[in-house]
Amino acid sequence: MKTTTKQIIASVMAIGAVASANALEIDIYGAFGMDDEPIFQYLYDDGSTQDLMAGGGIGVYAGQSQRILGPVKAQLRGGVQHGVIEEVEGQVSYRDTFTYFPLYANLMVEVTPELSVVGGVFYPLNPFYKKTVNDNHGIQKLQSDVGYNLALRWMATPKSPDNDNTFYMEVRYEYTEAELTTYSDTLGNSVDLSGLFAPVPITNLGLAIGLKF
């Protein structure tokens, strides 16, 4: 079942309006794309490759959490995830990127004061693949399904009762699929790609390092 961008944003805003968040979290996430096939690949003469994976790369995220019952917290998180590969051959430069703006609505269960299990809904907002050759570029836009995400978090103990700032690390996995919808480029071309290709998995496994305020 397809979920529109407006429905996702409205749901996240509604959840945020129910309870005021009491902990701001900011982290950097480095991820490996987990699909079997890259969204694009550079193949070199020696047989080596450089792969662009949908979901891989570096991300910056911000989130908030609110305790709702005992060891259970509700968590909202959002950010940007960006993967890139580049190459130069003579006078020609190539740059391929895959970018999306993920939104999450999760439950976090504290197993111990330091260890928590996280899981919930994952939605990549406005995913797109961009290919640049010198000064020209083309963009393939995608429409995503709602997916899921899982994580295991380790939280450092605060240094003092008067300081709530806490360092944390989180191993994350997420999965969903997206369909190509349109292609456009700087040469004036525009093509409707709906239904022409198989869905693209947006999936990754990685490590986040962050700070809770």
Image: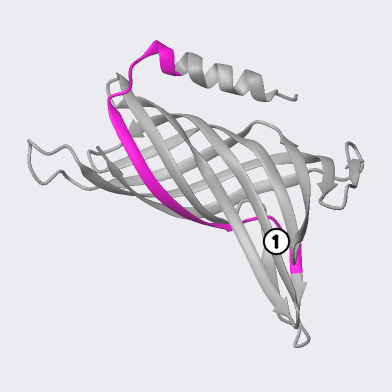
Residue found at the far top of this picture: 18
- On the image, which quarter does residue 118 sit in? top left
Q: Return the residue at label 1.
A: 96
Answer yes or no: is residue 39 visible. Answer: no
At x 65% / y 66%, what residue is drawn?
Answer: 85
Q: Quadrant of residue 96?
A: bottom right
Q: Secondary structure at mark 1?
A: strand
Q: Where is residue 86 shown, x and y percent of the image?
A: 66, 69
Residue 50 in view, yes or no: yes
Quarter containing the N terminus: top right
Whether 60 is drawn above or below 97: the answer is: above
- Magenta stretch holds residue 28: yes
| Front one among 55 and 82 | 82
Judged from this view, the residue extending furthest toward the bottom is 46
Quadrant in which the C terminus appears: top left
Residue type, mark 1 in image: Asp
Residue 24 percent across, percent down from the top left: 31, 33
Name the foreground residue: 139 vs 206: 139
Q: Does the magenta run of residues contain 78?
A: no
Q: Which residues are magenta?
A: 16-41
